[in-house]
Image: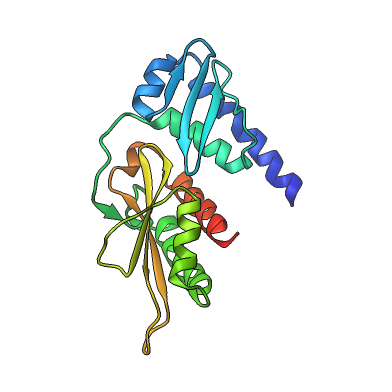
Amino acid sequence: MEQTADRAFQEMLLPAKERLRGRQPEDVAKKSGAVYDPEAALLKIASLNQIVEVTFPDFTCRQKLENWRHLLLLHYLDMADGFPVSDQLMPFGDVKDGLIRGTKFDQTVEVELMKLLKDMQPEQLQEICTALGAEIVKSKADFAAVFPFFPHYPVTLNVWFADEEFSATGKLLLSKSADHYLTVEDAVTVGDVLLKLLNS
């Protein structure tokens, strides 16, 4: 199974790099929120709690990233068009072409977060989120954290803690501008990565 996943990653990695080949690094940086260091020939991009360095012109990550996160980064650099990040939020089901895949993932998120939050104290959740670089923000939810997955691709976690009547529940939400930076397939992968990190 692991070999199949690695083969799938390798098959997708080459075209992802090819789509970026020939692009001007300054333009890629401007549209994606990365910083280009011409002396080192590096694009530096913030992702959650780290700065990832991507070599130019071969677009290889200098840090060891989990395969799918590496691919997400290349897709993000390719698609980013510099569109302003919207403060309005939407579920994954509202992402372009996300009616089936996105809506199914929204349901998965609710189930997984219910399990995660079952025995978790608010302080524990805040500690996990801040360790991943999230900003704790005010919200209509009991708890809200905004994860800077990429500079122009925030993901918001809203949580309602358990009370005498209801179990704890949560949602992951994207900015309304998300379609300018990743496809629905990549958006769901972003959500998967975050769920794993929250559970680790």
Residue 108 visible? The answer is no
Residue 172, quarter of the rendered image: bottom left
State how the image is colored.
rainbow
Near-viewer residue (3 or 40): 40
The residue sitting at 33% across, 29% down in the picture is: 81
Residue that extends furthest to the bottom in the rendered view of this protein: 164
Query: Residue 153: horizontal and vertical position, in percent?
Result: 38, 42
The residue sitting at 40% across, 61% down in the picture is: 103
Near-viewer residue (44 or 178): 44
Quarter of the image with the C terminus is bottom right
Query: Residue 69: horizontal and vertical position, in percent?
Result: 56, 41
Query: Residue 47: horizontal and vertical position, in percent?
Result: 48, 39
Near-viewer residue (97 or 126): 126
The residue sitting at 55% across, 55% down in the picture is: 197
The residue sitting at 33% across, 37% down in the picture is: 180
Question: On screen, 98 above or below 83?
Answer: below
Residue 49 visible? The answer is yes
Judge left or right: residue 61 versus residue 107: right
Query: Residue 34: horizontal and vertical position, in percent?
Result: 42, 27
Question: On screen, 37 above or below 193?
Answer: above
Near-viewer residue (62 or 10): 62
Judge left or right: residue 50 versus residue 11: left
Number of numbered discs on residues: 0
Judge left or right: residue 121 versus residue 30: right
